[in-house]
Image (cartoon, rainbow, N blue to C red):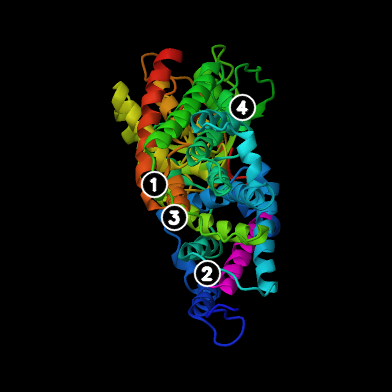
Amino acid sequence: MPPADSGLKGQPSFGHWVFVAVLGLLLLGQFVYAPYLTSPALQTWSTVFVAICVQALPFLVFGVLLSAAITAFVPASFWTRALPKRPALAVPVAGVAGAVLPGCECASVPVASGLMSRGVTPAAALAFLLSSPAINPVVVVATVVAFPGQPMMAVARFVASLVVAVLVGWVWLRFGKGEWLRARRHHEHAGFAEAMRHDLLHAGGFLVVGGMAAATMNVVVPREWLNVLAGNLWVSVLALALLAVVLSICSEADAFVAASLTAFSPTARLAFLVVGPMVDLKLIALQAGTFGRRFAVRFVPLTFSLAVLVSVVTGMVLL
Amino acid sequence: MNRLTQSLVLVLLGGAVLRITTVSNEYLNYVKPGFRWFLIAAGAAVLVVGAVGLVKKEDGHRGPWVAWLLTLPVFAIFLIAPPPLGSYAARSEEAPARPVGALTAYTPLTRPVSEMTIGEFLGRAWGDTTKSLAGKQVRLTGFAVPSKQKGQWYVARMQIACCAADAVPLKVAVLGWPAPAENQWIEVTGTWVPPKAGGPEPGTVAPELDATDVTEIPRPIEPYE
């Protein structure tokens, strides 16, 4: 039965007209608007915005592909066998398993969502979601390269990120409620291609929201403000943790930015590296879009505060 | 958003990514050169998913409204054609950034004029105890950034690790030459001016270069270091 607004036959729908308008604007714009879109601030904003979207796209496609493959081809029974029966044990196992997915945070959201839809305990899938962008080999190597002569930075990042992921998973297991997580709207019959196309449109749209927010902060917030805050331990840790949230840099590149923030203590820079892959504007948008707003308003503050606390403790012990 | 529109949005997005990676080199304004093949693969995948949706006539689910936003990067790419980060982004941070992965061993400069990246120059000026830069002619490539201080301007280049969102500006102050137009790409030849004793600590202000020649050049294909 074709849906009411199929549009493939019969009356063109509203969506078609919007699309025609979009195409028209694109064609017209080349000649009419382009000469006016030259303000340096707008151009810098658009460069950063397009850069975030373009850079995240391969990871997003990879994550969506993997998620669709998990949904379509891996039977649910596989996960019940692969993960320990007791959820309290499944959380750390899933956290450590994050080390094998070599991607950045954009890939991990659809994959975690795919895991949940296949019956993996949400707490374990969330531990995987948090740990995989932070502790995978690509990110560890990037951190070692960015901090020459300070291998403890990569060690501290690995340890702190894993601890945060597992702690958040356990807290969610103890206090989380199933109704906070929006169920995936996928129908059981939805195949590989359908799952992929839905996730791509959905997660991609929210990625754009996050990219816009991050580009705005990137252009609007001058970094010399930060140097004023570098003196005090807690203030500097919070400042860099918040910077990680607003800049939304890919976890494979954030170590290089952290290395350039030389005015800050190693502990504050560790907080930047631990918070960034777990909480940032584009991730918040992606998570709210994928798991629902009721999930995000609880999960994001929980993750952020645990990440800051664990970073400070790890920094004091290891750095 | 119905199925046909969803497919068209995906085709548009995939097409835009393929355009900036295959038809032009614009992707270099946003990401590292090594990213090209990942982008081509991702753009092709998005295009194929969209094209399959156009061809296969089956009833789909209504798409999310948020997918409309995927047209925004397409708009930006086609209408604004965002240029590489330039003087506006480099000026927003007065304190010079430290180059990442600076050299640890500085080979002596033997050529009459040594071409080097601005990152290498900063590394030698700030971190080299053997003062290998002293008295040597060097040539730097970058774009011009005005300075608030009189009698100087900056030759700058952005360094990116992954994409333009993580760019940090590398800057060298140029003395003894009139400032070119803002954002003009140039080759600057000159010698390093060692900091005076009792001045600011190395690494807190941009090192200085006494220019003997400044040539205007077209923008390099790869705008970042």
User: How far apart in space, not on screen, are marks 1 and 2 (Cα)?
Assistant: 24 Å
Instruction: Say which of marks 3 and 1 sits in front.
Output: 1
Q: Residues within 10 Å of mark 1 (few under 14, many from 20)?
A: many
Q: Position of residue B185 (x, y in %)?
A: 55, 46
Q: Position of residue A115 (x, y in %)?
A: 57, 45
Q: Is residue A273 visible?
A: no
Q: Chain of mark 3?
A: A
Range covered by the magenta-colored residues: B1-21
Q: Is residue A96 visible?
A: yes
Q: Amino acid under label 2?
A: Arg
Task: Determine the secondary structure under disc 1.
Answer: helix
Task: Determine the secondary structure under disc 4.
Answer: helix
Q: Are tags 3 and 2 found on a single chain?
A: no
Q: Are tags 1 and 2 found on a single chain?
A: no
Q: Which residue is mark 1?
A: A296
User: How far apart in space, not on screen, are marks 3 and 2 (Cα)?
Assistant: 20 Å
Task: Determine the secondary structure under disc 3.
Answer: helix
Q: Chain of mark 4?
A: A
What residue lies at 57% left-to-right and 48% top-to-bottom?
A: A114
* Mark nearer the N terminus (1 vs 4): 4
Is there CB contact under 8 Å for labels 4 and 2?
Answer: no
User: How far apart in space, not on screen, are marks 3 and 4 (Cα)?
Assistant: 30 Å
Task: Determine the secondary structure under disc 2.
Answer: loop
Q: Residues within 10 Å of mark 4 (few under 14, many from 20)?
A: some
User: How far apart in space, not on screen, are marks 3 and 1 (Cα)?
Assistant: 15 Å
Q: Chain of mark 2?
A: B
- Relative to A10, residue B1 above or below: above
Q: What number is the disc on residue A209?
A: 3
Q: Is residue A119 magenta?
A: no
Q: Chain of mark 1?
A: A
